[in-house]
Image (cartoon, rainbow, N blue to C red):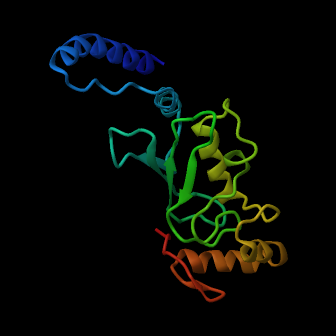
Amino acid sequence: MLKIWSMKKEQQKAENSDGAAAGAAGGPKKKKVTAAQLRVQKDLSELSLGTTMRTDFPDPDNILSFILYIEPDEGMYKGGRFSFTFNITPNFPHEPPKVQCREKIYHPNIDLEGKVCLNILREDWKPVLNLNAVIVGLQFLFLEPNASDPLNKEAAEDLRSNREGFKRNVRCAMMGGSVKGEGFDRVAI
C-alpha cells in the first residue's frame, strides 16, 4: 500500500515541479499514473507466487503487460512450463485482464490459439477480484482440467471418455509430439 501512495506522491511532486517548468518552456507534461496502474501495483505487491510461478516484465516501465510462468508440481501437467501473457486495459479492474497462453498445448480449457476458458476472465469477473484470483484460477486449470466448459472440445471429450488416454495425450503433447494429427509445443522441462 505504501508503494501506491508513494507513487502517487511522486507523481504529484513531479507535476508541481514540472508543471511550472513545462508550462514556461512549452514542453510536454509527465504522464499521470492511472487508476488501473495503481490497482495493478497493489495487486502485484500482494501476490504470493510460491516456487511454481514467476512473473516477468518485458518492459519494466509498463506494469499493465507482463508474462506469468507456471510450472505445475503436481497433476497431469507436472513437469511442464507454461507461460501466459497478461494485458491489462486502462479499465481494470472494471474489465478483466486479457490472458493468453503463449504455447500450443493440449488442454480442454485452452484452445490451440492460446485462448483461456476461465469463468472469472469472462462473465464472472467482478472488480473486487484481483490478479491473484486469476493466477490461482490458471493454476487450478492445470490441477483439474474442466471438461464441462471446454474451448478445446476434442481434449474435453478425450478427458471425459478416457482419462488414462487423456493423460497419455497430455504427456505426448508436452514432449512436443502430435496428438490426433495436431503438433504441440514442447513444454516439458
Q: Residue furthest left?
A: 25
Q: Residue at x 48, y 75 (%)?
A: 186
Eyeballing the image, is 42 above or below 23?
Answer: below
Q: Nearer the viewer, residue 141 or 42?
A: 42
Q: Residue at x 52, y 42 (%)?
A: 88
Q: Quadrant of residue 22?
A: top left
Provide residue 72's location: percent of width, then percent of height.
57, 57
Q: Residue at x 79, y 61 (%)?
A: 149
Provide residue 34's location: percent of width, then percent of height.
46, 27
Task: Give the number of marks.
Answer: 0
Provide residue 3's location: percent of width, then percent of height.
41, 21
Provide residue 94's location: percent of width, then percent of height.
63, 34
Q: Quadrant of residue 93?
A: top right
Q: Residue at x 54, y 71 (%)?
A: 104
Q: Nearer the viewer, residue 66 or 26?
A: 26
Eyeballing the image, is 106 above or below 132?
Answer: below
